[in-house]
Image (cartoon, rainbow, N blue to C red):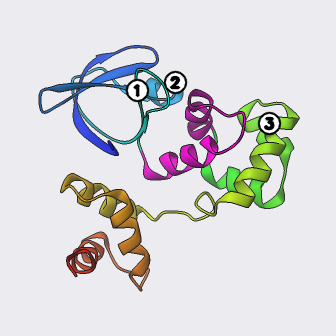
Amino acid sequence: MISYLSGKIILKEDRFLILNVNGVGYKIFLSSKKMETIEETREGLSVFCYLNTKKDPWEIYAFLSLSELELFEALMKVSGIGPKAALEASSLAPLDKLRESLELENEKVLNELFILGKKKAEAIIFELSRQTKAVAKKTSKEDEEVIKALSKLGFSKKEITESLSKIKGDKLNAEDKIKKVLKIIGK
């Protein structure tokens, strides 16, 4: 499973880009909003990924933050929301505004955010409120740094997040969290 890529941009199109990772070119799809922010400068880019194996050919959807990926994965569980719609939706809504809308079950706000019909907004509210607290739980900046750093070392996202959940003390910096996670994984 591909969950993280880091490399140089070799081609940028409207809906996708090609990322050279150690001599292998990966075609990755980003939301149109995120594509606007990325310059085709052949600079380095690091992204969290979702590998969609349900379609032939397989597609890689990329996200600049772990919280966007988690929102995308939660939206993919909603009936009637496909990967392309979830990709766009995950970048359109500020997470705080989406969380507030879910807590208040406010389909009007969701409708404004995603430009969806009332039924889809209601489905998102129902499914996400019922299924997951991942959207409601904010991943700290330090946790994202830990996940990014340890992913580069070859550890799986699941392994890292499970270890992070066992760490007590929210006031730890990323370096201390990395040390503690490595101790937990090493046991």
**Label 2 with label 3: CB-CB less than 8 Å:** no
> What residue is shown at x 62% (from left), y 31% (from top)?
82
Magenta residues, start to end: 65-92
For disc 1, the marked residue is 58
Q: Name the residue under label 3.
A: 120
Name above or below for residue 106 compared with residue 141.
above
CB within 8 Å, label 3 to label 1: no
Is 81 situated above or below 104?
Answer: above
Q: In this view, does 66 lie to the left or right of 151?
A: right
Query: Can residue 109 be seen from the camera position used here?
Result: no
**Residue 32, numbered circle:** 2
* Residue at image coords 31%, 64%: 146
Where 49 sits versus 135, above or below?
Answer: above
Which is nearer the N-term, disc 2 or disc 1? 2
Secondary structure of the residue carrying numbered label 1: loop
Label 3 CA crowd tier, 10 Å (few <14, some 14–19, many 20+): some
Q: Please say whether residue 150 is visible from this viewpoint.
A: yes
Q: Which amino acid does label 2 sit on?
A: Ser
Where's residue 83, x and y in %? 56, 32
- Give the distance between the C-alpha atoms of the residues marked 3 and 1, in whole angstroms: 26 Å
How would you rate the neighbour count of disc 1 (Cα within 10 Å): few for under 14, some for 14-19, many for 20 or more? few
Q: N-terminal of the two: label 2 or label 3? A: 2
| Label 2 vs label 1, nearer the camera | 1
Front residue (pair 78, 103): 78
Q: How many labels does the image show?
A: 3
Expressed as whole percent of the image width and height from the top left, the position of residue 59 reads 42, 27
Q: Residue 22 location, x and y as percent?
A: 12, 33
Relative horizontal placement of residue 97, taking residue 149 as reference (left or right) = right
